[in-house]
Image (spheres, grey):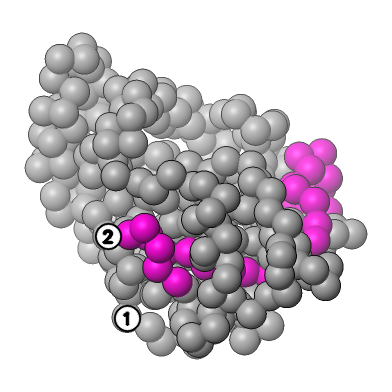
């Protein structure tokens, strides 16, 4: 059971950090994965306190934080991790990890700002290029992305989804997913996938996980789904997130997609095979996985509604990407 986030619990956690008391604490916008609080100490310094709500695996948290530390040391814009009084990257309270980060000033992504689109493309390429220097052993949990499973364990995973939602009337969705996977395997055999350039991927590179100032990226955050895989997986997902008309839309603006891809390509040139993979990867990024939907159920959310949402998103994006294919 998750802890009740009382003011007393927050005070207990913050007392384990070297900040000037008594701090002012304000809840920030809700996240699906974590609880975040804006903290300002008596000296006026501002921080973000994060409670890892969905991930109880401390090995995974430690891995993510070590990666972020190294990324910060490489000069990439992200928040700094504040060590606890005991010198730890996080503290434990009520069975979960808590982390204190520096607060980074800036604004959310503006969908009408093409300079920010280009900056996002350039910074994603820089992220993938810089992080080749980060030599960490990846710590995985079952809700992390693993697109390669759609090749190696796809039948097993589809059966798990079908069993989970058997009473939900998902026959049409399952027919679509099986046909989609069959087409995926025909067009992209596993050896073709494995030949794509790969490395570290942020895997959630979008406007709400970063802040801008004067069209410059000032901070990239939320490394929860960080993993290794083909770079183009990240490129395709981010292209959609920045080139869509607005938050919640599935319509991709072709001219904006080209701005994003051109800026990326100027820093890390995309191969022809990577460009050919973009339409497939954009859809694959949303393919549902059983462990994630099981987690949604445990959290009390409507896992069936989310399953249907992701399948519709795959269908809509498939149509969008077919129209966009000639221009990528």
Residue at mark 1? 137
Q: In the picture, residue 262 is in which quadrant?
A: bottom right
**Residue furthest to the top:** 169
In the rendered view, would you say 154 is above or below 164?
below
In the rendered view, would you say 24 is above or below 165?
below
Residue at mark 2? 141
Q: What residue is rendered at 52% in x and 47% in y?
A: 6
The local secondary structure at tag 1 comes to: loop
Q: Is residue 24 left or right of residue 59?
A: right
> Where in the figure is residue 10, as x and y percent of width and height?
55, 57
Along the line of sight, which residue is nearer the eye, 82 or 105?
A: 82
> Where in the figure is residue 165, as x and y percent of width and height?
19, 23
The local secondary structure at tag 2 comes to: loop
Q: In the picture, residue 185 is in which quadrant?
A: top left
Q: Is residue 156 left or right of residue 287?
A: left
Q: Is residue 177 left or right of residue 215?
A: left
**Is any part of residue 238 visible from this angle?**
no
Q: Classify 10 Å Cα crowding around label 2: few (below 14), some (14-19), many (20 and above).
A: some
Circle nearer the viewer, 2 or 1 = 2
Along the line of sight, which residue is nearer the eye, 266 or 16?
A: 16
In the rendered view, would you say 200 is above or below 190?
below
Along the line of sight, which residue is nearer the eye, 121 or 211?
A: 211
> Where in the figure is residue 219, as x and y percent of width and height?
70, 65
Q: Is residue 81 magenta?
A: no
Q: CA distance from mark 2 to mark 1?
A: 13 Å
Q: What residue is rendered at 83% in x and 72% in y?
A: 43
Q: What residue is rendered at 60% in x and 29% in y?
A: 248
The boundaries of the magenta stretch are 91-119
**Residue furthest to the right:** 214
């Amino acid at each position: 059971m998750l802890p009740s986030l009382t003011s007393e619990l927050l005070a207990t956690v913050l007392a384990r950090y070297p900040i000037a008391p008594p701090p002012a604490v304000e809840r920030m916008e809700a996240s699906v994965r974590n609880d975040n609080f804006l903290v300002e100490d008596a000296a006026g310094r501002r921080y973000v306190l994060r409670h890892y709500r969905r991930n109880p695996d401390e090995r995974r948290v430690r891995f993510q934080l070590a990666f972020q530390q190294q990324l910060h040391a490489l000069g990439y814009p992200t928040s700094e991790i504040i060590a606890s009084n005991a010198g730890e990257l996080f503290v434990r309270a009520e069975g979960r990890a808590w982390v204190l980060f520096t607060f980074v000033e800036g604004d959310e992504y503006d969908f009408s700002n093409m300079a920010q689109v280009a900056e996002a493309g350039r910074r994603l390429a820089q992220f993938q290029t810089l992080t080749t220097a980060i030599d960490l052993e990846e710590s995985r949990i079952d809700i992390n992305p693993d697109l390669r499973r759609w090749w190696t364990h796809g039948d097993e995973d589809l059966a798990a989804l079908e069993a989970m939602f058997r009473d939900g009337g998902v026959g049409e969705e399952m027919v679509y997913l099986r046909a989609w996977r069959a087409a995926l395997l025909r067009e992209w055999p596993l050896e073709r996938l494995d030949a794509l350039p790969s490395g570290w991927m942020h895997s959630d590179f979008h406007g709400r996980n970063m802040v801008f100032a004067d069209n410059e990226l000032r901070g990239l955050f939320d490394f929860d789904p960080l993993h290794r895989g083909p770079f183009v997986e990240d490129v395709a997902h981010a292209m959609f997130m920045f080139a869509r008309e607005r938050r919640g839309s599935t319509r991709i603006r072709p001219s904006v997609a080209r701005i994003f891809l051109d800026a990326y390509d100027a820093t890390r040139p995309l191969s022809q095979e990577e460009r050919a993979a973009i339409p497939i990867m954009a859809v694959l990024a949303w393919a549902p996985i059983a462990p994630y939907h099981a987690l949604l159920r445990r959290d009390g959310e409507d896992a069936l509604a989310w399953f249907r949402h992701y399948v519709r998103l795959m269908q809509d994006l498939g149509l969008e990407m077919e129209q966009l294919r000639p221009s990528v």
